[in-house]
Amino acid sequence: MILQMTVDRVTLDVVVRHATVADAMRQALLTNKAADYTYQSEAEHAVAVMIYPRCVACSQGTVEINGQAKLVDELTPQEFCVLPYEIGETWLQAVIEENPGWALQIEETSEKKF
C-alpha cells in the first residue's frame, strides 16, 4: 500500500507491505531498541515501543521533516513520536490493514463472568 501525504511541513512517502518473517523479527528488535531511549512522557514511551516498531518494520520510503528527508529505517523513536497525528494514524491504519495480526491488543483487566 502506497502512502503519500503532507501535514504541517512533514511529508510521508512510504510503501507499507505485507510483513515477512524477517519483518516480524525486525519489529521485535525495534521494540527492544525503542525501550532503551528516554522519553518525555509515558505516552511517548508507549508510542515508541508499540506503534513505531509496527510502522517502521514493514515500510520502505522516506519521511521529510522541515525539508530534510530521512529513510524510514533512519527515523528514531523520538522523531516518530512528534510526527503529526494524521500521519501517525494513517500510517498505523495502513500497517494494520496489510497486517491484521499486528493490530494493537488491549489486555482485559477484568475477570470474565460466566
Image (cartoon, rainbow, N blue to C red):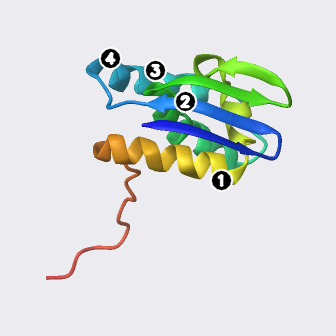
The reply to whether dot 3 and dot 2 touch (C-beta < 8 Å) is no
Residue on which the image places disc 3: 29
Judge depth for marks 2 and 1 and give the one in front.
Answer: 2
- Residue 14 is labelled as 2
Q: Amino acid at mark 2?
A: Val
Mark nearer the N terminus (1 vs 4): 4
Element assignment for label 4:
helix
Judge depth for marks 1 and 3 and give the one in front.
Answer: 1
Judge depth for marks 4 and 3 and give the one in front.
Answer: 4
How far is disc 3 from disc 2 in space, using C-alphas?
21 Å
Q: Which residue sits at x=32%, y=40%?
A: 99
How far is disc 4 from disc 2 in space, using C-alphas?
19 Å
Measuring from the top left, give residue 76's x and y in whole percent: 68, 25
Q: Which residue sits at x=35%, y=65%?
A: 108
- The answer to which quarter of the image holds residue 17 is top left
Residue on which the image places disc 4: 22
Q: Amino acid at mark 1?
A: Glu
Q: Is residue 112 left or right of residue 65?
A: left
Mark nearer the N terminus (4 vs 2): 2
Mark nearer the N terminus (3 vs 2): 2
Question: Pointer 2: residues within 10 angstroms few (<14), some, or many (20+)?
Answer: many
Mark nearer the N terminus (1 vs 3): 3
Mark nearer the N terminus (2 vs 1): 2
Measuring from the top left, give residue 36's x and y in whole percent: 63, 25
The reply to whether dot 4 and dot 3 touch (C-beta < 8 Å) is no
How far is disc 4 from disc 3 in space, using C-alphas?
10 Å
